Amino acid sequence: METLPAVRPNDTVMTYQPSSIPSAHEMAVFTTMANQAVASKMYRGVGDQAGVMMIMLAARELGIPPMQALNGGLHIIEGKVEISARMMSAMIRRAGHDFDIIESTDEICVLEGRRQGKEKPLRVSYSIQDAQRAGLVKDKGGWKKVPKDMCFARALSRLARQMFSDVIGIGYVEGEIRETKLGTYEQQKQVEEQIAEEALGNEKASLIDEYQLLFDAEDRQLAGDFLSMICKHFEWETSYAIKNLLQDKPTLLGKFGAWKARQKEKEERPATEVATV
């Protein structure tokens, strides 16, 4: 029987080395986990069951526990893997390597990395000037809000690609793909918020049209006043108020009729009193 070589002190010990193809049992476990994640509605930003599966399978190849990946450790952007800075740091140290933070400010981050068993370190840096040259510094973006953290993440990604590529594979640090290919995360968020606002605006306009069509043309202005009164009384947003009112249209029309009569009575009362005098 062949004897396996002993593990030497300078050898890198990996805690998890999965085969390239998951077994049928692993796939069944991942499928169940993905279905539960989607059903929980706690991972809506990740996507559907297939999206959750892709993240778990990518995490598997990197030796990242699936739930740590889903909980912010790993993202897939246009088919490329982004790894959070904390996860990347943990992966490097888990593989037996290490790095020191030589300098970390809002202006620059300098890191010095060492492979296990190797005496020669590698020093890398990333500065706010590097980010500016790359066109990454935008108003309201992460480079404006947390430049120290952003410099650290980019310096770590640079160090990992140059010295620990066997650890991170083809991964990038979180935000790197979004910044270079899709614009900054904040810009993307602003676009998404704008789209959401437009959708809400369209929904609101549609609801108002549906509400107004319930009334005769001569009553529509009064119907708008009635709706404003309802919103003010219950402190409801317009769309929410209309949705509630439209659930029972006969009751809505009945209450509007009674309110209209009271308004007419209030308008006529001073004229009657003046005529009497």
Image (spheres, rainbow, N blue to C red):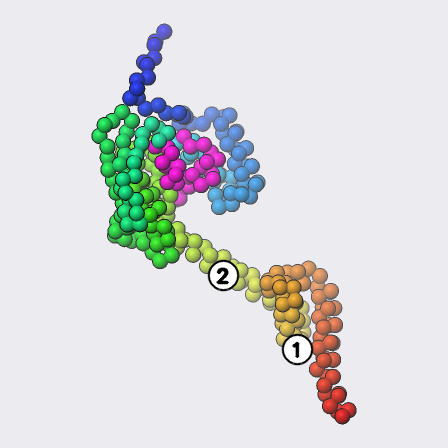
User: Can you tell which quarter of the image residue 109 is in?
Assistant: top left
Query: Is residue 267 at least partly visible in the picture?
Result: yes
The residue beneath circle 2 is 198
Foreground of the two, 206 or 5: 5
Rendered view: 16 above or below 223: above
Image quarter (top left, top right, bottom left or bottom right) of the N terminus:
top left
User: Can you tell which quarter of the image residue 210 is in?
Assistant: bottom right
Foreground of the two, 195 or 189: 189
x and y percentages locating residue 178 in the rendered image: 37, 48
x and y percentages locating residue 10 in the rendered image: 29, 21
Residues shaded magenta: 63-92
The residue beneath circle 1 is 218
Circle 1 SS class = helix
Rendered view: 207 above or below 37: below
How far is disc 1 from disc 2 in space, using C-alphas?
30 Å
79 relative position to 215: left or right = left
Residue shown at 28%/29% (left/top)?
115
Foreground of the two, 185 or 106: 106
Query: Is residue 242 at least partly visible in the picture?
Result: no
Residue 68 sits inside the magenta stretch: yes
